[in-house]
């Protein structure tokens, strides 16, 4: 399995035993050649383009107060996350009606 992570999760692969993909590191700190800057920017853009869905998913989960102020049992948290994810999935796939029914 491949885990897409941001730069803050470097070293996570050793802990999880999975392949962790982080944004590419800079090899030049100063005076980088133009070809390197372009290649580096393209690689970072490709990584962030793959990861944006994860970031949006996390943001949607944070918008639900049930997750922000969870006062229940820890054992029920995974059920709540699954329920919220299901509601979000349904919300995003539902087609708007706009009162245009004949």
Image: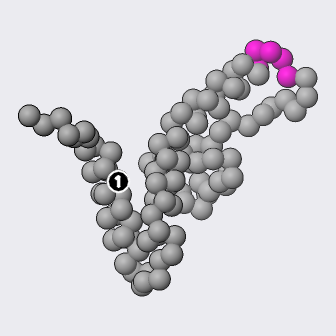
Q: Which residue is mark 1?
A: 88
- Drawn side of residue 35 relative to residue 49, left or right: right
Instruction: Tell me which residue sits at (49%, 47%) in the image.
Output: 56
Q: Which residues are magenta?
A: 32-36
- Drawn side of residue 29 relative to residue 23, left or right: right
Q: Secondary structure at mark 1?
A: helix
Q: Nearer the viewer, residue 17 or 42?
A: 42
Instruction: Tell me which residue sits at (49%, 59%) in the image.
Output: 63
Quadrant occupied by the C terminus: top left
Instruction: Tell me which residue sits at (76%, 22%) in the image.
Output: 37
Residue 34, compared with residue 55, is above or below; it is above
Q: How is the image coloured?
A: one colour
- Drawn side of residue 49 relative to residue 25, left or right: left
Where's residue 44, x and y in %? 65, 32
Where's residue 73, x and y in %? 42, 84
Residue 69, compared with residue 93, is above or below; it is below
- Main secondary structure type of the part rendered in magenta: helix
Instruction: Tell me which residue sits at (76%, 20%) in the image.
Output: 36
Q: Nearer the viewer, residue 28 or 84?
A: 84
Where's residue 8, x and y in %? 69, 52
């Amino acid at each position: 399995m491949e885990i897409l992570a941001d730069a803050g999760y470097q070293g996570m692969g050793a802990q999880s035993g999975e392949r962790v993909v982080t944004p590419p590191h800079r090899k030049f700190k100063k005076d980088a050649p133009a070809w390197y800057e372009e290649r580096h920017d393209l690689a970072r853009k490709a990584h962030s383009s793959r990861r944006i869905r994860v970031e949006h998913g996390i943001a949607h989960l944070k918008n639900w107060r049930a997750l922000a102020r969870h006062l229940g049992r820890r054992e029920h948290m995974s059920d709540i996350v699954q329920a919220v994810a299901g509601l979000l999935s349904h919300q995003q796939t539902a087609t708007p009606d706009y009162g245009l029914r004949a």
